[in-house]
């Protein structure tokens, strides 16, 4: 019985062999199997091709006209330790095979080839091995991220992107602007950047620019001299002095006045400022991370925010997703907050009912993570059992879910009604977008991965 080879049509293969007929033969059988194939007779050309494009597997001849194949093998391994490499040669010398394996070859083929299916079987095997290797590398990187950034909760694609961006920018001293709705955890991200930076041993100070009157905010940031205003009985250092060498987080930066923006621009540009009522120029070394829930570019157009300060702040921008954009992470947050408040309130073995979690998933969370934390704290405090049930949820969460359920669902038990509603909701959404998963998942406010899981859960497929 002929073995069916499962190919990876998206896989890219580079064939390096000095015999044109071998290149043509491999190109033909691999292309028919669904692979994307490039061929070359020369080692130098192969190295150029490999450096300028991503390949999943290399078929590499040992005898090449310009560079020995074993040397090409070693150079490719230095460039990419994870690419699959299969050596090919007419030489059957066991010593050559051993040396190729030592240098990083994954497998070995001897010319002339007896059966194309054998080649495809070996390629299929090595591609699957590479896939597992790549997945292990990816999973290890995610574990490393979570170990280094323990305060960031989540595995959703948007959060994974933020992990990687923080990893790149944390060691730098550049300014960072966090943009996101209220309650999305911008201060946690700012502190994480600080803790991962070379300033971690110094202070991290957070100040909400929208919570203080302008004059109080100015004196808090820059300090003041004795007699600068009524009640200024002694010279007082400001935050820019206190946080010297560390990181200052300016939350709600869009709430600052034009006058204060001028002072902020100066200290961000050259690291100098004067206290309120003072004439002495003070030097400080502070990394600034700002945050806003406003459209600052729109504020610039309306002349309520200085354009020069906007561009000074907007060197690195991180868009922080709302909770409804990362519902895959909601169970993780729920588990984290249950553990936090169960410990605080001395309640053991706390968990949450599945139907309670379903109600929470259907709620839009306008207050984001901060609102979710308050809801969980309330639920842990109110429950008389070890399980959080829907009765511990605020009325607004339950009522919004019920308002979204048509009247013909009301006679069903709550859990059945929610299942029926979600299934019909998905079908209506897919019909609306002509079964375009990307568009439907975007309107639903969930990831495509989560959307596919729901389709599989309900057995939904395009008719």
Image: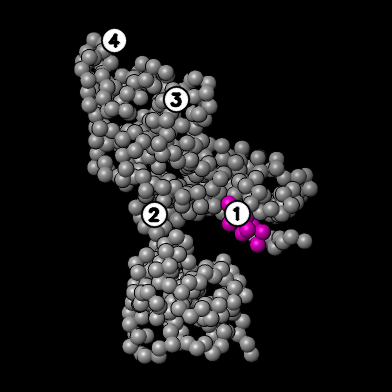
First along the sequence among labels 3 and 4: 4
Name the residue tied to disc 2. 146
Residue at horizontal 42%, vertical 19%? 257
Instruction: Report whether 401 appears left or right of 50.
Output: right
First along the sequence among labels 3 and 2: 2
What's the distance in space between the residues labelled 4 and 1, CA to CA? 58 Å
Disc ID at residue 229: 4
Does any portion of residue 392 appear in the rendered image? no
Does any portion of residue 46 appear in the rendered image? yes
- Which of these two is toward me, 157 or 32? 32
Task: Report the magenta residues as a range.
Answer: 447-456
What's the distance in space between the residues labelled 2 and 4, CA to CA? 48 Å
Q: Quadrant of residue 80?
A: bottom left
Name the residue tied to disc 3. 307
What's the distance in space between the residues labelled 3 and 4, CA to CA? 31 Å
Report if the CB atoms under discs 3 and 1 are less than 8 Å apart. no
User: Is label 2 in a helix, a strand or a loop?
Assistant: helix
First along the sequence among labels 4 and 1: 4
Mark 3 vs mark 2: in front = 3
Percent from the top left, x then y, of residue 166?
Answer: 39, 46
């Amino acid at each position: 019985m002929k073995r069916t080879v499962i190919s990876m049509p998206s896989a890219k293969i580079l064939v390096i062999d000095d015999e044109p007929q071998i290149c043509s033969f491999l190109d033909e059988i691999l292309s028919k199997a669904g692979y994307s194939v490039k061929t070359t007779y020369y080692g130098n050309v192969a190295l150029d091709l490999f450096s300028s494009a991503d390949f999943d597997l290399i078929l590499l001849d040992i005898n090449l006209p310009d560079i020995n194949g074993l040397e090409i093998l070693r150079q490719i391994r230095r460039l990419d330790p994870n690419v699959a490499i299969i050596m090919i040669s007419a030489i059957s010398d066991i010593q050559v095979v051993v040396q190729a394996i030592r240098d990083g070859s994954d497998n070995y083929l001897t010319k002339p080839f007896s059966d194309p299916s054998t080649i495809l079987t070996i390629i299929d095997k090595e591609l699957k091995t590479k896939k597992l290797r790549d997945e292990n590398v990816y999973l290890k990187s995610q574990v490393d991220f979570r170990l280094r950034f323990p305060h960031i909760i989540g595995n959703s694609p948007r959060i994974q992107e933020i992990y990687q961006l923080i990893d790149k920018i944390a060691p730098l001293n550049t300014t960072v602007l966090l943009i996101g709705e209220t309650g999305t955890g911008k201060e946690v991200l700012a502190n994480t950047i600080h803790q991962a930076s070379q300033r971690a041993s110094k202070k991290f100070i957070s100040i909400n620019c929208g919570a203080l009157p302008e004059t109080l905010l100015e004196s808090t940031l820059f300090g003041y001299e004795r007699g600068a205003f009524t009640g200024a009985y002694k010279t007082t250092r400001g935050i820019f002095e206190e946080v010297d060498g560390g990181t200052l987080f300016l939350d709600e930066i869009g709430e600052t006045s034009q006058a204060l923006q001028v002072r902020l621009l100066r200290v961000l540009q050259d690291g100098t400022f004067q206290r309120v009522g003072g004439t002495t120029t003070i030097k400080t070394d502070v990394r600034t991370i700002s945050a806003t829930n406003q459209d600052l570019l729109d504020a610039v157009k309306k002349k309520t925010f200085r354009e020069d300060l906007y561009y000074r702040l907007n060197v690195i921008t991180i868009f922080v997703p709302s909770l409804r954009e990362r519902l895959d992470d909601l169970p993780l947050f729920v588990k984290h907050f249950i553990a936090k408040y169960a410990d605080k309130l001395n309640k053991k073995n706390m968990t949450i009912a599945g139907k309670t979690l379903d109600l929470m998933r259907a709620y839009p969370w306008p207050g984001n993570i901060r609102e979710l934390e308050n809801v969980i704290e309330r639920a842990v405090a109110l429950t008389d059992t070890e399980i959080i049930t829907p009765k511990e949820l605020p009325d607004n969460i339950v009522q919004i879910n019920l308002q979204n359920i048509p009247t013909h669902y009301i006679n069903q038990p709550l859990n059945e009604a929610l299942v029926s509603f979600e299934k019909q909701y998905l079908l209506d959404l897919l019909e609306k977008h002509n079964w375009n998963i990307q568009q439907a998942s975007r309107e639903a406010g969930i990831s495509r991965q989560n959307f596919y899981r729901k389709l599989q859960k309900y057995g939904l497929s395009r008719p």
